[in-house]
Amino acid sequence: MKLGLQLGYWGAGPPRNAAELVAAAEEFGFDAVFAAEAWGSDAFTPLAWWGSETRRVRLGTSVVQMSARTPAACAMQALTLDHLSGGRFVLGLGVSGPQVVEGWYGRPFAKPLARTREYVSILRQVMARAAPVVNDGPHYPLPYRGPGSLGLGKPLKPITHPLRADLPIWLGAEGPKNVALAAEIADGWLAIYYAPRLAGMYDEWLADGFAKSGRSREDFEVAATCQVVVTDDPAAVRAVLKPFVALYVGGMGAPGMNFHAEVFTRMGYGEVVRDVGRLFQAGRKEAAARAVPDELVAEISIVGTAEHVRAEIGRWEKAGVTMLLVGCRDVASMKAVAEACQ
């Protein structure tokens, strides 16, 4: 099982020990370091800053939000960071949700699957650099000929030669159609709140995508966000994790269109989702966290003694996960996780 350090996105300011954690990831044999973004810090800059001190680990985004940049702008940042890292960059993309896309980026959220397909197509064209980039689709037309256009747009190839035409593109996906799309057009799936118990269902979704593209799972990566904590007091750790689950169930999506909540509903926790959402929306965040059951947290995390963690990692690997993205807070906990994986 590969390990990836998930730095996430910042709160009010940058985490003080991020550079130390990145150095430890390199030392302890982690495969990759990932950064994320929401509506504050971006995902590319931290990787360039802290990743400049690394020589081996891959540097990935988990995820950059598609509506934050045009496909061409995203490709420019990706090829630049791939050059600077010597071919260690992984581009993880996600559509986010309508509250962020329309409220923060000022873009329409409709037709996320079609937008993703066009976005990735343009990225592939840029990286291939075989011909000037063009796109006839309605979401990201190149050249642009719509309202306000001067009609002078010219198809272009990137000035900079991409280091790799096959720079890996992974998709953050939660629903069945989006997961299938990842298998069809991407090189990996970034899974949030993965549950090994449902591996058969996920395999069916992925198989649909592979069937459409004619590709196989052999070189496809499944990177699952999973809190891995070696501890003799798992109950205390799960209590710490519950507020984060409540936040994503009740606060990271609009009522009636919360993709994270839908994940837990498919897992069989529909009543929990309703209770947590109701409490969170009413401002009762502590009560919402208490409404998250232990068994739910246990399904999406690995918490316990080193022996338990080692056994659970093996179970996740058998379920099809190739990498665990862990959010360690200190070097000691990172070392314990790395040793449990050996």
Image: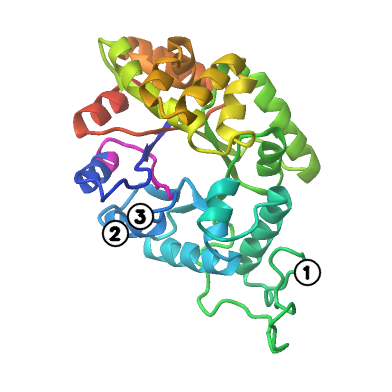
Q: Is residue 170 visible?
A: no
User: Type of residue at label 1?
Assistant: Asp
Tag 3 residue: 47
Q: Which residue is mark 1?
A: 136
As shown in the figure, which amino acid type bears the numbered disc 2? Trp
Residue at disc 2, secondary structure: helix
| Horizontal and vertical percent position of residue 312 | 44, 15
- Quadrant assignment, res 215: top right
Q: Position of residue 120 (x, y in %)?
A: 65, 57
The residue at the point 31 percent across, 12 percent down is 234
Give the residue at mark 2. 49
Identity of the residue drawn at 68% across and 85% down: 154
Left or right: residue 124 versus residue 7 is right
Quadrant containing the N terminus is top left
Q: Residue at x 73, y 79 (%)?
A: 147
Disc nearest the viewer among 3 and 1: 1
Q: Pointer 2 and pointer 3: residues touching (CB < 8 Å)?
A: yes
Q: Which residues are magenta?
A: 25-37
Front-lying residue, 280 or 153:
280
